[in-house]
């Protein structure tokens, strides 16, 4: 999240018309949803990745780091779709374990390829918008689209609290590491428990500070974003 926020403000497309980028991404996602074609989906993935890395000038290693987490979850899901178990050898590739076969059918292979290409296209499109458009510009777009204020407020507050949680957890983990809190399995579990407890308390304190700050600025239920 910290990397995404950093590059959203410093990339070469940060000042480019946000509505144009938004429409471009929505158009790509619409194509992904309605055209279940792996060739089209992979083309969108390549185009979005190219624009993000070479046009917006996001470093390749940072882009791969940001993409790594959703891709890990994606691959776990793909494996569950790809592999099947059957008492009969109905697979194009299989391994026999006891009296069962674990393998890949033609249908599961096709479904896995379609799912993989669709999700990669969707992720790359979403990250293109997130990495090239600051949050305040996204909020302006949502206001122009007449999205209810309560949803925009939730977006701002959730976005803000992500950074609060990351900031607080970073400090707590650093303090625990200095005290060798993760040098073995037992200490690691103990440190994680203390991390969760301390994080909950400190986030609540930060929340109270934010409420006081908003009240002092006469917050009336709407975040003002300049045009």
Image (cartoon, helix red, strand yellow):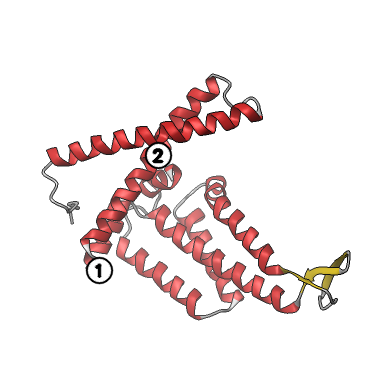
Quadrant holding the C terminus: bottom left
Task: Judge whether 36 appears above or below 49 on screen.
Answer: below
At 71% from the left edge and 79% from the top edge, which residue is drawn?
107
| Mark 1 Cα-neighbour bin, 10 Å: few <14, some 14–19, many ≥20 | few
User: As rendered, which of 155 and 43 lies closer to the eye?
Assistant: 155
Comes first in the chain, label 2 or label 1:
1
Q: Position of residue 16 (x, y in %)?
A: 33, 58
User: As rendered, which of 37 and 162 lies closer to the eye?
Assistant: 162
Q: Secondary structure at mark 2?
A: helix
| Mark 2 Cα-neighbour bin, 10 Å: few <14, some 14–19, many ≥20 | some
- Where is residue 88, by image quadrant? bottom right
Q: Secondary structure at mark 1?
A: loop
Q: Which residue is mark 1?
A: 145
At 89% from the left edge and 64% from the top edge, which residue is drawn?
98
- Please tell me how many numbered marks the rendered image carries: 2
Q: CA distance from mark 2 to mark 1?
A: 30 Å
Left or right of residue 10: residue 147: left
Outermost residue, top direction?
179
Task: Judge whether 221 appears above or below 166 on screen.
Answer: below
User: As rendered, which of 44 and 178 lies closer to the eye?
Assistant: 178
Outermost residue, left direction?
218
Q: Which residue is mark 2?
A: 165
């Amino acid at each position: 999240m910290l990397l995404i926020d950093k590059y959203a403000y410093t990339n070469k497309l940060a000042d480019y018309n946000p509505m144009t980028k938004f429409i471009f991404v929505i158009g790509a996602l619409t194509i992904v949803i309605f055209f279940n074609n792996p060739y089209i989906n992979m083309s969108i993935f390549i185009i979005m990745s190219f624009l993000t890395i070479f046009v917006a000038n996001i470093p390749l290693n940072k882009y791969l780091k940001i993409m790594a987490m959703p891709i890990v979850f994606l691959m776990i899901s793909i494996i569950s779709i790809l592999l099947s178990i059957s008492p009969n050898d109905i697979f194009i590739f299989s391994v026999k374990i006891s009296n069962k076969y674990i393998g890949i059918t033609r249908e599961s292979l096709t479904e896995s390829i379609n799912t993989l290409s669709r999700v990669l296209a969707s992720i790359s499109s979403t990250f293109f918008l997130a990495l090239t458009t600051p949050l305040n510009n996204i909020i302006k777009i949502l206001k122009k689209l007449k999205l209810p204020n309560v949803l925009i407020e939730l977006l701002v507050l959730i976005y803000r609290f992500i950074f609060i949680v990351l900031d607080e957890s970073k400090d707590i983990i650093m303090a625990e590491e200095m005290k060798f809190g993760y040098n073995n399995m037992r200490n690691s579990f103990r440190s994680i428990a203390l991390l969760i407890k301390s994080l909950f308390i400190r986030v609540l304190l930060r929340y109270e500070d934010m409420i006081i700050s908003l009240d002092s600025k006469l917050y009336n239920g709407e975040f003002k974003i300049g045009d």
